[in-house]
Image (cartoon, rainbow, N blue to C red):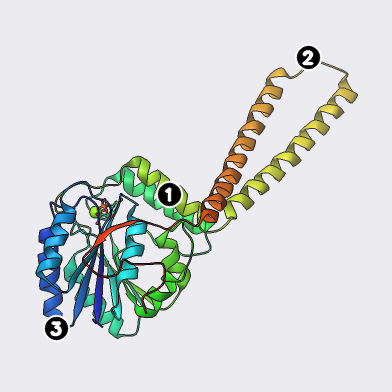
């Protein structure tokens, strides 16, 4: 059983994977601890899989699982976690934006007894708009969810074996790791590092993908948005009642005047907007129930380095 397992989800990373691997091995060897590398090829359409095959063939500590298509980073991380056997697990990206040089620091903090060590990036070099938007988003998430999600605290973290097992015991198919990490609890410590640009290749997170990820994050954790929708509906209903009463009173006092056509239309349009939004929220939840009830696996494995494909049960 190795002391450290590294989980790396890779999607079209053939441009950086070799450099990443070399850097990572260098850092890990310098720690003097035993380790294994668990790469997950998330259905890449470039040569990522071929690179992984070579790396695994050349080094027994390197293992990989390759998906039949792109299932998304969350699924890739899950498969990677299921592959691990180490006492501590580090999750990191393949593009060197999560500097391997920080791993010794993480191990040191693990040595102080923390079950989760989070490397939190600052936002140097990132566009102002994106920074502002993500900050606003995290504020929103914190209000809605019962779990604490920190801005800039991504997936670069070290987890103890028991924290990994806790994560793997969560059965949901719609996984929002940032929330799950916080949900499982345990002693967590974080430190900040300076954001670095991706070493090569391209980011896979366009605006649309980010927006969908954001919606997932908000809805996957609890039904508070639904509760908010109900509250909003009740308040609106109440104000509509008051408004109606006011109109009736007006008619009684002044007699029928020119009907307030514009006001009426405004109210109807406003109310339908709220109704449609509310229905959308409800629909999202129904969709999620449907999705969960199908109990589909998170991914389909195409091949591995020869070891058992990572299955739904936590590694013993
Ligand atoms: N990734 C993945 N599946 C995907 C998209 C991304 O496994 O569908 C991996 C990717 O290879 C990288 C990590 O997730 O190792 C982070 O992706 P990226 O660097 O594109 O995101 P960014 O750093 O721009 O947020
Ligand atoms: Mg990146």
What is the crowding at mark 2: few (fewer than 14 residues within 10 Å), some, or many (at least 20)? few
Please tell me in which quadrant of the rendered image residue 195 appears: bottom left
User: If you read the primary sequence from the N terminus, does the residue marked by circle 3 or circle 2 appear first?
Assistant: 3
Please tell me in which quadrant of the rendered image residue 303 appears: bottom left
Residue under the image location 51 percent in, 51 percent down: 291
Apparent side of residue 160 relative to residue 12 in the rendered image (left or right): right
**Whole-percent x and y of residue 144?**
53, 56
Give the label on residue 214, or none.
1
What is the crowding at mark 3: few (fewer than 14 residues within 10 Å), some, or many (at least 20)? few
Cβ–Cβ under 8 Å for marks 1 and 3: no
Apparent side of residue 64 relative to residue 295 in the rendered image (left or right): left
- CA distance for labels 3 and 2: 86 Å
Q: Secondary structure at mark 1?
A: helix
Say which quadrant the N terminus sits in. bottom left
- CA distance for labels 1 and 3: 40 Å
**Whole-percent x and y of residue 65?**
26, 62
Viewer-side label of 3, 2: 3
Q: Secondary structure at mark 2?
A: loop
Disc 2 residue: CB within 8 Å of ligand 1: no
- CA distance for labels 1 and 2: 47 Å
Cβ–Cβ under 8 Å for marks 1 and 2: no
Q: Looking at the image, is 261 positioned above or below residue 15?
A: above
Q: Which residue is mark 2?
A: 258
Please tell me in which quadrant of the rendered image residue 31 appears: bottom left
Apparent side of residue 262 relative to residue 170 in the rendered image (left or right): right
What is the crowding at mark 1: few (fewer than 14 residues within 10 Å), some, or many (at least 20)? some
Q: Which residue is mark 3?
A: 32
Viewer-side label of 1, 2: 1
């Amino acid at each position: 059983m190795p002391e450290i397992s590294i989980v790396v989800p890779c999607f079209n990373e053939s441009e950086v994977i070799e450099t990443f691997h070399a850097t990572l091995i260098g850092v890990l060897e310098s720690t003097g601890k035993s380790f294994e590398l668990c790469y997950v090829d998330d259905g890449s359409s470039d040569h990522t899989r071929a690179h992984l095959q070579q790396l695994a063939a050349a080094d027994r500590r390197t293992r990989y699982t390759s998906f039949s298509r792109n299932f998304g980073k969350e699924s890739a991380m899950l498969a990677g976690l299921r592959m691990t056997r180490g006492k501590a697990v580090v999750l990191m990206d393949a593009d060197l934006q999560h500097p391997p040089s920080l791993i010794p620091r993480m191990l040191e903090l693990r040595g102080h007894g923390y079950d989760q060590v989070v490397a939190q990036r600052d936002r140097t070099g990132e566009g102002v708009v994106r920074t502002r938007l993500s900050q606003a988003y995290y504020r929103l998430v914190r209000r809605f969810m019962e779990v604490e999600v920190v801005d800039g605290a991504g997936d670069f973290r070290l987890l103890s074996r028991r924290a990994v097992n806790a994560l793997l015991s969560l059965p949901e198919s719609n996984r929002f790791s940032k929330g799950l990490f916080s949900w499982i609890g345990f002693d967590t410590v974080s430190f900040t590092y300076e954001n670095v640009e991706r070493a090569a290749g391209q980011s896979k997170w366009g605006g649309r993908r980010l927006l969908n990820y954001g919606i997932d994050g908000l809805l996957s954790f609890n039904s508070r948005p639904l509760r908010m929708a109900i509250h909003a509906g009740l308040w609106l209903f109440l104000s509509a009642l008051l408004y109606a009463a006011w109109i009736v009173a007006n008619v009684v006092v002044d007699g029928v005047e020119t009907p307030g056509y514009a006001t009426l239309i405004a109210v109807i349009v406003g109310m339908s907007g709220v109704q449609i939004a509310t229905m959308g929220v409800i629909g999202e939840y129904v969709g999620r129930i449907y999705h969960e009830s199908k109990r589909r696996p998170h991914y389909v494995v195409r091949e591995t380095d020869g070891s058992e494909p990572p299955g739904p049960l936590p590694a013993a």
